[in-house]
Image (spheres, rainbow, N blue to C red):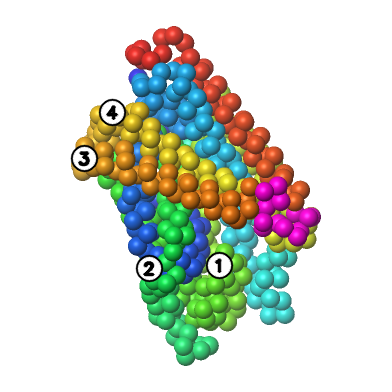
Amino acid sequence: MTENRENWGTKVGLILAMAGNAIGLGNFWRFPYQVAKNGGGAFMLPYFAALLIIGIPLMYVEWMQGRYGGKYGHGTTGAMIYLESRGKLGHSSAAIIGAIAGMLTFSVTVLVNAYYTQIIGWTLGYSYMSLTGGYMNAAKSTGEIFVSYIQNPAMSITFWVISLGLLAFALSRGIQKGIEAWAKVMMPVLYVFGFILIIRALTLGSPVNPDWSPIKGLDYLWSPKWSELKWESALAAAGQIFFTLSVGMGIVSNYASYLKPDDDIVLSATSMIFLNEFAEVILGGTIAIPIAFTFLGPEGINSGVGLSFIALPNVFRMMPAGQIFGGLWFLVLFFAGFTSAIAMYNYLIAILEEDLNVPRKVGALVIFGLYILVGLPSALEPIVTKTAELAFLTELDNWVGSYFLVVVGLIEALVAGWLFGEKNALEEINRGSYWKVSSGLFNLMIKFLTPLSIAILLIFSTKSYIQNGYLKWVPSFVEGMPELLPWVQGARMLMLVILVMGFAEAYYAIQKKYGSAQTQKGAKI
């Protein structure tokens, strides 16, 4: 059965859009910090192991399930999981599993993008501030400037709404004229700006301290520190793979649902992974850390998540032509974030289009309003509390932006390997592919190693969450700050509401299309 759905216009556009989906803010500020924190070069061993055992197999699974779901007119995870599992489980059980997967991906695309687009707004605002010299005033520290930025609605909310408006405009134009057209511009520009910044970073010399130079910064970042390589490092590496490849979010499958029937899945997925890893390991590892180390020393790396908005603006203050290079840096972050956010935005439009017959342009406006409504609490928290703790955002990110991705990945691997089965999965993966995935590799990885590894990751992540106090009524990260507790509880209530909505929507959509006796187990479609 096929449905008339828009397809990607060109293979280049598809790969760039998919790479843009995966290449996000985490490639440029989260990855270098994780490497430095977890053993430097030694971190790359569990990182590449997680890429091979979890990342690449899951990527093939999501491309496969996306194209398979697209044949039936579906671009959402719940319906795809249902279609894969109903042959073994029957309609009722498959509908429940599909609804659970749909619930989790719905929560990710609603809640993560609600605050992710705000961070994108920060990058756009800081691009403006870089070019206009907004943080060049040495009278205030860059930390104070960042706090004043997020507490100033005229800046933080304005640039957030502008970013959301650009996303709505792009997506209202469809797959080829919207997502693909923007990816063809933004992704090449991102790489060009990235290479310009690399050249500038590696030619800085030692302007502050003879022991601080770009090459020594790279050495500090990549030298193996075996004593710091612990079990937590392996967890961090696996988590980074989920984060960087955007697996477990439903958005890779959503993009793959617009593939043509014989598009090459294996080659396209491999190309996407290569572009993402190049951006993360080469660009991400060769821009921020050398620049920060050259001007700030080891503490530049230890800035962690504050690297982009606090540490690097200090550098741009001191660097010759710092306003220009600061503007380029934040534009790189903006393009990376935008091309990831557009994928989550499109997932929600697909729900409206396919399940409620809402036209795309109307859907783009509806989701714009939804993101404003759901994102306002995290935007208003620093303005109301007069702090920069961001407890609302932190609580959502701990669960929706991290934990739920792993659960979805486990469901996808188990369904593909054990319910959809080797024959069906390989037929879908290998159709039209120049390189073929073998039966032995499928059984070893997708049936056994990949789900087992994800299950271990989930078990130890749960243990870590318990130890860190995330399950307490008062989580450890807000202990001693009672004014932030309402924001944490508000985030939990919002998360519960979105989960219920996601389950109800996915279950309704499955029952609406497949609930009749003619589409029960064994029936032909």
Of mark 1 and mark 2, the one earlier in the sequence is: 2
Of mark 3 and mark 4, the one earlier in the sequence is: 4
Q: Residue at x 66, y 73 (%)?
A: 142
Q: Real-space Cα distance between discs 3 and 1?
A: 42 Å
> Mark 1 falls on what kind of element?
helix
Numbered badge on residue 42 = 2
Q: Residue at x 46, y 22 (%)?
A: 93
Amino acid residing under circle 2? Ala
User: According to the image, label 4 marks what residue?
Assistant: 424
Left or right of residue 302, residue 233 in this image: left
Q: Quadrant of residue 149?
A: bottom right
Amino acid residing under circle 3? Gly
Numbered badge on residue 304 = 1
Q: Position of residue 139 (x, y in %)?
A: 72, 80
> Mark 3 falls on what kind of element?
helix
User: According to the image, label 3 marks what residue?
Assistant: 440
Range of the magenta residues? 472-484
